[in-house]
Image (cartoon, rainbow, N blue to C red):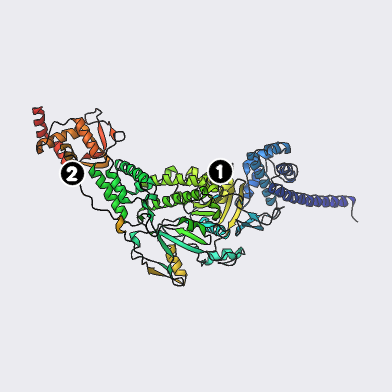
Amino acid sequence: MSSSRDIGEHIRSERRKELSINREELIKSAVEHGNEALSETDWPRLAAISCEILYPALDIDEYTIDDYHRAVQGRPLDWHWDDLFLFVDDPDTDYWTSEAQSYDGQVALKHIFLSLQSAAVVEGVVDSELSREIPVFGYNLQLGRRWLPWMATRDDEQVLRSLDHSEMVIAAGAHGSGKSTAGQTEAEDHVAAGNKLIDLHDQSKAENALYDVEESDEDLITVREEMGLPIGFDDEYSRPGLEIYVPMTKSLDGLELPYNTESDEFVVKPFAIPASEIPKEGLVLMVDQTDAQQKYLRIAYEKVDREIDDWTLQDLSNAVYETNARADVADRIRASLEVLQHKGYIRDKQSSNLLEWEEIFRDPSLITSFTVSLMDDEVEKLVVMHYLLEKIINERRRLARENTLGNYPMLSVVLREIQKLAPSQNKRSEDVRKASIQSATTATLQEYGEDLRHARLEILADCQKFKAQLDNDVRGHADRVYAFKGQVDDVYEAFKTRVLNSRGLAATVSQYPTGQCALLNEQGYTMPIQMAPPRSMHLDTKVYSNGLIARVSVLDEEEMREVPWDVSVPNRLLFEERVNVDGEEPDRSTYKFASSCIEEDDESRAFTVDLHDAYRVWAMTNGEGMDVTKKQLMEDIVDYYSLDKDEDKTRPTYTDGSRKNAWKRICLNERGLDYLDREDERHNLEEVA
């Protein structure tokens, strides 16, 4: 027979069990309702649940918080120690409700609730598995999936993009993080939505030549299968058409490119650019000249652009001779322009193979890709890309002015490795010409960001380091940023644009597996999201060196054939032989001296006193006039070498310790130095004086 003591102990034990069960149910209920409040951004309700229910039910305080901190390490749990520590010190509903009236307070309250939820996981009260998955969509197609805690209450799917305005989207992450495959998946969604897709930027591998080829990589196919997504093309997303444009350079002569034996045509198309459509700075920088020579070229450009509608490089060359450039300077510019003309792709508006932009914009079922991978000159690659960017935005603006833009589909422009077009200031090329083009292209992309809605276009871009590599003003226009794995600091820079105090989140994302990311937008962040690989083939550079070779290797109906195109320059564009006009260049002794004794060197300088001493010895030796002052001599040398009196004149320290006038970008050559060093002749000059 049980004693009254045994009965009392039994009752107390049952009561403890009941309290324990009630506590677990209370915590589970608080977590479920807290997630519901969070999804609805009901901040007063979330504050009340966190302060009055969840926190009191958990065994967490200022003494035990470190135990929880150690317990969550290495686990995929939201944990924000700084915010939680402040909360434990003052878990007051009214205070946190008031704090949540600001954006920073809302972020802090969200962090506190998620950290308390993680503490419940540590205690074993809440299931730690992110077992619930919901699909995430763009316009129409499923882009991947998002994992949610089982207790989260929200819709059965999530749309990642804004459906009421144009967007600039940037995917940022390390090499191999999955950003480019995710970008290709999103590009397919734009095509499925009826957008016209132009994949504009490819400098080396023709990665954008595979939109109409089904994926054959077993690993990527398996990922789609595990998500329950269709493999390859189907009724939901049929095989798109694809046209690939390359500049019509001489390098195409005799080259083999993909040929479709069923349609009996080449997949690749050559295109030419009218000289009169190339932006001034782009064309000037194509020609490797001194600053002074570029000045004359700019003056000539403005003249022909003002006076001739469809001018050629020959017209531009002729206009240089109408400036005040010395004949030999104009000759050098002419020679450079003639070399540029012979490359083949710069022509006039009468030429065939010009880009018909209205036709390109019109057909959303045909993807248009451009690649400059077959060009050799890196500066010219950038100039062509700049031309295409400028031409697209200007054509869209023209259609808008004519009130006909609404007759064309929305335009989506893909810019792979956008940092090569718009690098941050400290990442621009050390090559002055390349850096100048990058600066111009950056300005154009800033215009894109400002004009997305008006021009009815969107941008899909990717880069490796969001802040370190990409221009600040360009990335500032991003509406959505996908943050993939990378170095913590790089990920943190992306997070800081949307979420303060986010280093802990960045640390989590930096360790994400390939294809997983966080979405950052005006609502804050959404994570984790697993992006799906595309239906079309993604170039594996370990298997294929470029996309053109890859497509021929995979498609039975394509083979490499030598192109039959005539890439020679039409006779009307060839430079005519120029007849020298008497009296174009004065026969001055100073010019003779400049020609025979001085040379150009951007890294050197010459002192006026040395130039004058060398000239006098040269003049005495060669029977030329010696009565030339320093001022007269330097005026002629400045004219002969097109020096800039503001930029090139300097006053450094001379060998005797005094400061003397000198000129940059010129120096005495060996002959000139020999005249300067002839002590006997200099002594004779002093005796004559």
The residue that disc 2 covers is 582
Give the camera-side residue of 239 and 493.
239
Q: Amino acid at mark 2?
A: Asp
Q: Amino acid at mark 1?
A: Lys
Query: In this rendering, is residue 498 above or below 415?
Result: above
Residue 79 in sight from this viewpoint: yes
Where residue 525 sits in the image (x, y, percent)? 61, 48
Q: Which mark is residue 496?
A: 1
Left or right of 45 in this view: 160: left
CB of mark 2 within 8 Å of CB of mark 1? no
For label 2, the crowd category at 10 Å Cα-Cα, with few meaning under 14, some 14 to 19 and many 20 or more, is few
Left or right of 56 in this view: 418: left
Look at the numbered disc 1 and give the secondary structure of its residue: helix
Where residue 492 sits in the image (x, y, percent)? 54, 45
Q: Which mark is residue 301?
A: none
Where residue 499 sits in the image (x, y, percent)? 59, 43
Left or right of 244 in this view: 123: right
Return the disc, 2 or 1, that comes first in the chain's sequence: 1
Q: What residue is rendered at 42% in x and 44% in y? A: 439
Where residue 308 sits in the image (x, y, percent)? 35, 47
Q: What residue is rendered at 27% in x and 48% in y? A: 334
Residue 545 falls in which quadrant of the image?
bottom left
Query: In this rendering, is residue 178 above or below 637?
Result: below
Give the camera-side residue of 253 and 67.
253
Give the camera-side residue of 560 and 351.
351
Question: Label 2 vs label 1: CA separation?
Answer: 68 Å
Look at the numbered disc 2 and give the secondary structure of its residue: loop
Screen quadrant of the C terminus: top left
The total number of labels drawn is 2
Give the camera-side residue of 450 and 527.
450
Residue 176 in sight from this viewpoint: no
